[in-house]
């Protein structure tokens, strides 16, 4: 007999599978797998993080999960099944993905990362008798859940479960009904007043739930929600519901779609805060209230060294993550509409889709879209910014072949469009940003820095403002300030469509600081995203300073072969104001083989 001690612990075990999995796979194998992958990313894993679940194993159609408590397992099961019911609304029965879930509380045996024992077997058998979309739990689990979940239970009596010696009492959790005790706290499904959706993205941040079990943590949890509302309000193109209206839902059982109808918003942010020792975990998800689907979810783990700093960091992280998620959702919504269905802002979002393709043809289409938006609404400042950004990117990213013989005309058009946006909306951080970039590329870096800093003052979470500040600072001979600014931009928007340009600016700042190995590595990262002349020239010059002459010359040949780049050292160094920086670039590019004139 082995002398090894078997590790055991009490746990809540949850078993889940997809009802009719074989039928779904037979009908549409690739589509079913894609749906399940999406559900894992947008629903299952975020809910698992929130309720401290651990997926022990998965099969093609199911999973085995361990929770620290029956309450956590119950919360997860209810959240998943309610969300799935919303997602399946309106779908034919043969196209629905429906889970069956079983939950039991008991002793488990731990063997490395796997678990065994009667508790596992019972959970699996309870899942087997659950209805599609339903939750079946043991008597032991129901005793721990009573009074702790706002939900009804149906007594199924004693059930004979396969390979379980004695009949066991089982219960059905009614995910479609709340308990009578909670009825007075629920929001009516037929609100007395309905609001039309605004003509721009509209958001309400509901009070985050305190899952710590400590009343004093309510202040911290409420503070995070309030800071998120403040941070979201700085995005001028969002319509954000005020704090007092959002907090009217605190402690109430709500249907997100009802909240959307009552407040007249397209998106609702929901989340929770859990403290465990010296750590705090914040989870959040953004839900489209018209469909009930989650379009973004994430979690944030922090050390509780300074509560106010953590509160501010999480609020900024959530707000800046939401902005691109909403932008993407709005762009996709606009692309699905016919021209007859589109309003001014739809044309703007379709224009932004074309803008982010970074091609000559799409740039032309973007301009058409922005002008259509202005025709429908001449006060839409964002459309003027869109025109300025598209004209600037066409020039800066060399989307048109050959030399730009109309450079002065294009510069004037960019400035005119940006100034029109500022006249319509003096608080437009986007207008300040594009003005800053245009000024920096036209030798007025001091004014460019002022406009970039103004953009950041208007919205401290505006990543593009930090990018503009980095560009102007590099040209001015302030590479340390540029590096700080671009690192902030990358932190705020790590998946930005213009990441190749941001990394190129970071490489340039490192080059000007004589950190050539780091500059080369960052330039390679930029080029890994998209070929870009700035990154290419930094890489060639960095290789030269590192005495990697063959690599420098190969890189330079790519640069000189492109019709979208500077061909001489004089052209490259012209924007840099500090003589030392010009000499630094001259030395590196000369060693790499670039002509001086």
Image (spheres, grey):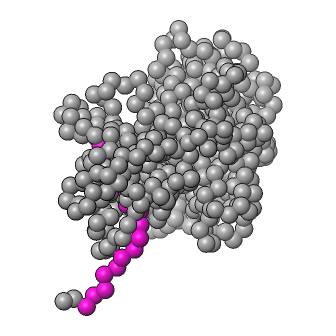
For residue 356, side relative to residue 200 (left or right): left
Residue 439 visible somewhere in the drawing: no
For residue 23, side relative to residue 482 (left or right): left
Residue 224: % across, % down = 70, 53
In the current view of this chain or complex, which residue is farthest to the top?
340
Q: Residue at x 65, y 45 (%)?
A: 319
Q: Quadrant of residue 375?
A: top right
Which of 204/474 is in front?
A: 204
- In the image, residue 115 above or below residue 16: below
Q: Residue at x 62, y 21 (%)?
A: 345
Main SS type for the magenta part?
strand
Which of 68/593 is in front?
A: 68
Q: Is residue 9 magenta?
A: yes
- In the image, residue 135 above or below residue 339: below
- Split into 4 quadrants, where in the image is the N terminus? bottom left
- In the image, residue 302 above or below residue 270: below
In the current view of this chain or complex, which residue is farthest to the front?
157
Question: How many numbered callouts?
Answer: 0
Q: Is residue 364 magenta?
A: no
Q: Quadrant of residue 389?
A: top right
For residue 97, side relative to residue 515 (left or right): left
Residue 159: % across, % down = 29, 51
Region in magenta: 3-18
Residue 265: % across, % down = 64, 29
Which of 309/168 is in front?
A: 168
Q: Residue at x 28, y 34 (%)?
A: 31
Q: Quadrant of residue 392?
A: top right
Which of 85/275 is in front?
A: 85
């Amino acid at each position: 007999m082995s002398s090894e001690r078997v590790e055991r612990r009490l746990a809540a075990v949850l078993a889940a599978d997809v009802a009719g999995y074989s039928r779904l796979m037979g009908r549409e194998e690739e589509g079913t797998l894609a749906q399940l992958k999406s559900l894992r990313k947008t629903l299952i894993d975020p809910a698992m993080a929130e309720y401290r679940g651990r997926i022990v194993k998965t099969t093609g159609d199911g999973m085995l999960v361990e929770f620290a408590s029956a309450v956590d397992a119950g919360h997860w099961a209810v959240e998943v099944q309610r969300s799935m019911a919303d997602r399946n609304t309106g779908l034919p029965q043969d196209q629905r993905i429906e889970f069956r879930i079983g939950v039991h509380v008991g002793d488990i045996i731990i063997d490395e990362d796997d678990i065994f024992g009667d508790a596992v077997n019972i959970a699996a058998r309870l899942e087997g008798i659950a209805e599609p979309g339903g939750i079946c739990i043991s008597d032991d689990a129901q005793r721990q859940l009573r009074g702790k979940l706002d939900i009804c239970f149906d007594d199924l009596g004693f059930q004979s479960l396969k390979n379980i010696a004695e009949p066991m009492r089982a219960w059905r959790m009614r995910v479609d009904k709340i308990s009578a005790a909670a009825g007075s706290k629920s929001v009516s499904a037929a609100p007395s007043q309905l609001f039309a959706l605004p003509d721009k993205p509209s958001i309400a941040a509901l009070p985050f739930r305190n899952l710590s079990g400590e009343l004093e943590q309510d202040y911290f949890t409420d503070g995070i929600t309030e800071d998120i509302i403040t941070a979201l309000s700085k995005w001028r193109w969002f319509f954000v519901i005020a704090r007092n209206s959002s907090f009217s839902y605190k402690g109430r059982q709500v249907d997100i779609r009802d909240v959307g109808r009552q407040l007249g918003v397209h998106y609702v942010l929901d989340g929770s805060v859990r403290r465990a020792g010296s750590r705090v975990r914040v989870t959040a998800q953004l839900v489209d209230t018209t469909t009930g689907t989650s379009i973004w979810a994430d979690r944030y783990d922090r050390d509780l060294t300074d509560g106010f700093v953590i509160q501010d960091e999480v609020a900024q992280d959530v707000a800046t993550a939401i902005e691109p998620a909403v932008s993407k959702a709005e762009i996709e919504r606009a692309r699905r509409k016919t021209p007859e269905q589109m309003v001014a802002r739809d044309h703007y979002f379709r224009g932004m889709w074309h803008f982010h393709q970074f091609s000559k043809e799409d740039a032309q289409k973007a301009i058409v879209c922005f002008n259509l938006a202005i025709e429908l609404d001449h006060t839409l400042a964002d459309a003027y910014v869109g025109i300025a950004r598209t004209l600037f990117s066409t020039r800066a990213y060399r989307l048109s072949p050959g030399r730009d013989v109309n450079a002065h005309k294009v510069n004037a058009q960019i400035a005119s469009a940006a100034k029109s946006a500022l006249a319509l909306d003096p608080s437009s951080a986007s207008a300040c940003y594009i003005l800053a970039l245009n000024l920096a590329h036209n030798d007025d870096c001091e004014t460019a820095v002022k406009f970039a800093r103004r953009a950041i003052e208007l919205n401290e979470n505006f990543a593009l403002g930090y990018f503009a500040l980095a560009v102007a600072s590099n040209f001015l001979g302030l590479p340390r300030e540029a590096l700080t600014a671009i690192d902030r931009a990358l932190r705020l928007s790590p998946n930005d469509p213009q990441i190749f340009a941001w990394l190129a600016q970071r490489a340039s700042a490192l080059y000007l600081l004589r950190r050539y190995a780091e500059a080369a590595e960052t330039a390679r990262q930029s080029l890994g995203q998209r070929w870009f002349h700035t990154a290419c020239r930094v890489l060639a010059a960095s290789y030269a300073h590192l005495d990697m002459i063959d690599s420098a010359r190969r890189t330079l040949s790519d640069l000189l072969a492109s019709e979208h780049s500077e061909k001489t050292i004089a052209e490259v160094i012209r924007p840099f104001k500090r003589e030392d920086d010009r000499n630094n670039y001259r030395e590196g590019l000369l060693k790499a083989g670039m002509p001086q004139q």
